[in-house]
Image: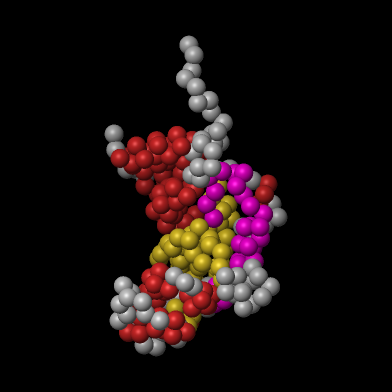
Amino acid sequence: MSAIYEVLRQLDEWRHLPAYQLERRVDIFFGMFLPKVIERRFGLHVDEVIPEFPLHKGKSKISEDPEDHHSVKVDFVVFGRQANKKRMFLIELKTDIGSLNADQLKNMENARGANSKDLLQGVIDAAQHSDSKHKYAHLVWKLLKLKCLGIDNLAEITNMQLGEIRPGLTSAFKKLGVGKEWCNACVDVVVVLPEESEGLEPYPEFHSITFDQFAETLETGYKPFVPEDVRTFLAHVRDWAHVRAGRVSPWPQQH
């Protein structure tokens, strides 16, 4: 019995307990398989998946104040390319259909309405005003490798010793700009959820992927041979699609 099997079995048991948020524990599994699913569903090549991506409230039009430097997080952003077109997918993962949040969906709609240049400039602005500049440096480096961001003198960031307190990070962030290739990327919202929900009806431009669709797409991507650990994950995904948390009896069945 594999360690992955035991981890998923434990998650499946604990998801029925009060206040236990499955989506905060299984995001690593969904994030691992998102590239294959997004590639097959949308017909593109995925370059990178970044979790807990910051959406600058001002730049993402989530706040009416363009100088609001707070941010909200989207579960994942997938960066891909389709022929010569760049695409960004803002992805929300829901393991409980009841956790769809109207305010959160409205935030995603506002962010989708912003252009890719504003979303990426928002990362730069959030980095400058964050108390976690060292962590933002790692996000910036990923975006530099993707050419989403650019800087004239790359050494200003790459030569910094992040183990030390370096106020120079703020000045370096100020010299960042949005890469030309990503100024007009297509921005889409995708919600990955157990089943179709009426909560998404006000947002016809959103894409939804149900757990059954996620599993089928991923399984098809591996055919004819699906690795054992992937089959184990897919079995749980399909179970989570049809058995809601707390809706099974905790008592041993009487015979």
Q: Residue at x 42, y 57 (%)?
A: 35
Q: Does residue 41 belong to the magenta stretch?
A: no
Instruction: Point out the residue furthest to the top here.
Output: 255
Give the answer, above or below, for where 17 lies relative to 79.
above
Counting from the top left corner in percent of width and height, residue 84 is at 47, 73
Give the answer, above or below, for where 116 lies relative to 4.
below
Q: How is the image coloured?
A: secondary structure
* Main secondary structure along the magenta-highlighted residues: helix
Counting from the top left corner in percent of width and height, residue 254 is at 49, 14
Does residue 12 appear anywhere in the picture? yes
Counting from the top left corner in percent of width and height, residue 193 is at 55, 47
Side of 52 relative to 4 (left or right): right
Side of 197 relative to 13 (left or right): right
Q: Residue at x 61, y 62 (%)?
A: 108
Give the answer, above or below, for where 69 lies relative to 202.
below
Instruction: Point out the residue furthest to the right here.
Output: 202
Q: Quadrant of the N terminus?
A: top left
Does residue 142 appear anywhere in the picture? no
Q: 120 or 48: which is nearer to us?
A: 120
Q: Residue at x 46, y 37 (%)?
A: 14
Side of 24 relative to 65 (left or right): left
Counting from the top left corner in percent of width and height, residue 11 is at 43, 39
Instruction: Point out the residue furthest to the bottom here.
Output: 152
Q: 31 or 223: which is nearer to us?
A: 31
Q: Residue at x 39, y 39 (%)?
A: 8
Q: 88 or 69: which is nearer to us?
A: 69
In which quarter of the view is residue 59 placed?
bottom right
Q: 134 or 154: which is nearer to us?
A: 134
**Magenta residues, start to end:** 92-120
Give the answer, above or below, for where 96 lies relative to 69.
above
Q: Does residue 97 belong to the magenta stretch?
A: yes
